[in-house]
Image (cartoon, grey):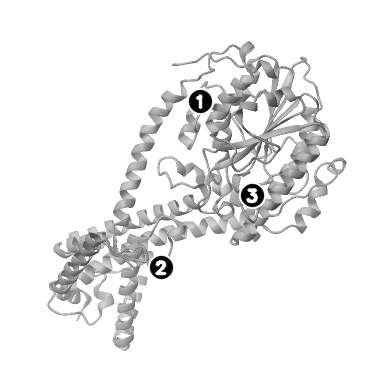
Amino acid sequence: MSTRQAASTVEGGEEESPTPVLASLPSFPRSLPRPWAMASAWTRRWRVAHPTAAQALSVTVTVLAAVLVVAALVMPNSMAQLHPRRFLRIPAEAVIGAAVLIALPRRPRVALAVVSGVALAAMTVLNLLDAGFNQYLGRGFNVVLDWSLFGDAESYLEDSYGRTATLVAVAGVIVLVLSVFVVLALSMVRLSNLLARHPATATRGTLVAGVAWITCSSLGLQLSGVPLAADSTANALKDQAHRISDTLKDEAEFRKVARVDAFGNTPGSQLVPDLRGKDMVFTFIESYGRSAVEDPIMGPGVDATLDARTQALAKAGFHAKSGWLTSATYGGSSWLGHSTTMSGLWISNQQRYRTVMASDHMSLTDAFKKTGAFDTVGVMPGVQKAWPEQKWYGLDKVYNAFQLGYKGPKFSWSTMPDQYTLQQFQNRVHSKQPADGKSRMSLLILTSSHTPWAPIPKMVGWDQLGDGSVFNGIEKAGHPSSYTLTDDTHTKEEYGKSVQYTVTALTEWLERYGTKDTVLVFLGDHQPNAHASGNHASRDVPISIVAKDPTVLDKIASWGWTDGLRPAHTAPVWKMSAFRDRFLTAFGSTPHPKKN
């Protein structure tokens, strides 16, 4: 029997093809490309020579196709839910799809199978993205806003693991995604052909599956707490639609919110009058989250460091108060935490960030600039390309990664150790008085506690830092980036050490170079990802204000913050967006609202 005859026979449902694998494929034209024709001929000869093996292979491929389709239909979008029992469910979409395919003639059936397979593959990719984003950023993937983050992810991989590993990883992801689309489309075609060959059996099976789904759904039957009746793909599709709708609505609503500023029309003379003459230093510590202070693995070491540094600063005449802020981001996207703190707006996604950066909404740093009494300087060792945000931040001068003279090794993503950054800040900025007799407000972003937390720099003598070459041996002796890649215990341990290092470097800098007028505000930008903070961590980060002048801390006495660098578990928790206005108010700023 020819291929065309076999296809015709099975389509009519009168006779089962002796070569079921071939029968499941679409009919080929009479004149095939030579390589394909040769392969097809070889396949037919092999099946004739080995009918039992061919039948077993056909059954195996069909079963695998069914397993893949069902797994894709019930796959959860969270790493924490990836458990075998999640896949032992009855998907409603499979029941409905089978009923539709059985009723269709051949060409519409095959076309629908292909389209369904591609759509299912797209939802599978989105579910995988959701799982990854939930694990690392504490939220699902936004199909409108998050595509730009893939470039940042590629840069992170290259900085942390090298160019070769990054190229391999990117190629692997591309191959995997394409394979998902091809395999699921072919699987749907194969299963649709199976239904067409056995319409009576397929109809009965579909009815049984439908009754079973309705029964399980009505009675709420579960397996180890997981409902047996599933409609995961339909719910995921509905969730994605809601996200898109909410994103589009949020854009218009946030533009209105960003136009309102309680201090937008405040004259410079009425901004932070109680900080005139002060040496202001605002510092963000990468991934410095609440988990660093309270996690049973990381907390003891970090808490001991905070307590020791509190005592050391006290001997030098500095005192501190600390509390908690709830960050607008989690696990990454540090710029959202920075801009939320400085703007007083809840900047929780890239769209809001772009809106604010293009606005004239006043940043906290810009407030100091508008006084006319402060020069403003930024030290950004993580910035390695053009940074147009400088204008919105109101920074007169910014030092990026290439302007700090570093000749030592990178520590994974971090371009240089924080101790070196702080010494360069001292040499290039802090030790020099502004020529116009102004005070200075400085913004520093410290990066040594950035994932993957291996290798980690160590403290060296401040007089030995030089051009950073002293760190060559330390970097080589440290753990490779892969050390924390898959082991959560290693991740927690090394993350905790990185926080200890940065806090030590920052407070030693203050102890060594701070003056009676220095006021240091330092905080975390967000919690570390779930490998370090766990799957149910809050978004809280510590914040501390340190000064020698007691009147500075007296201004925030009503805040109820904890004395010292370690905030108490019961210390007040504010949204990060509340800090700007509370800070401006505490230090004498007069509100003059701006509404456009």
From the viewer's side, name the closer residue of 30 and 418. 418
Where is residue 201, by image quadrant?
Answer: bottom left
Question: What amino acid does circle 2 point to?
Answer: Pro
Marked residue nearer the N-terminal end (3 or 1): 3
Q: Amino acid at mark 3?
A: Asp
Between residue 148 and residue 411, name the one nearer to us. 411
Q: Which residue is mark 1?
A: 358
Query: Which label is found at residue 84?
Result: 2
Disc 3 versus disc 2: nearer the observer: 2
Residue displayed at 50% across by 60% down: 172
| Left or right, 25 with reference to 539 | left
Where residue 67 appears, as percent x and y from the top left, is 34, 69
Viewport quadrant of the N terminus:
bottom left
C-alpha distance separating marks 3 and 1: 29 Å
- Residue 159 numbered mark, or none: 3
Q: Left or right of 579: which side holds 48?
A: left
Residue at 36%, 32% in the rendered image: 249
- Where is 103 relative to 342, above or below? below
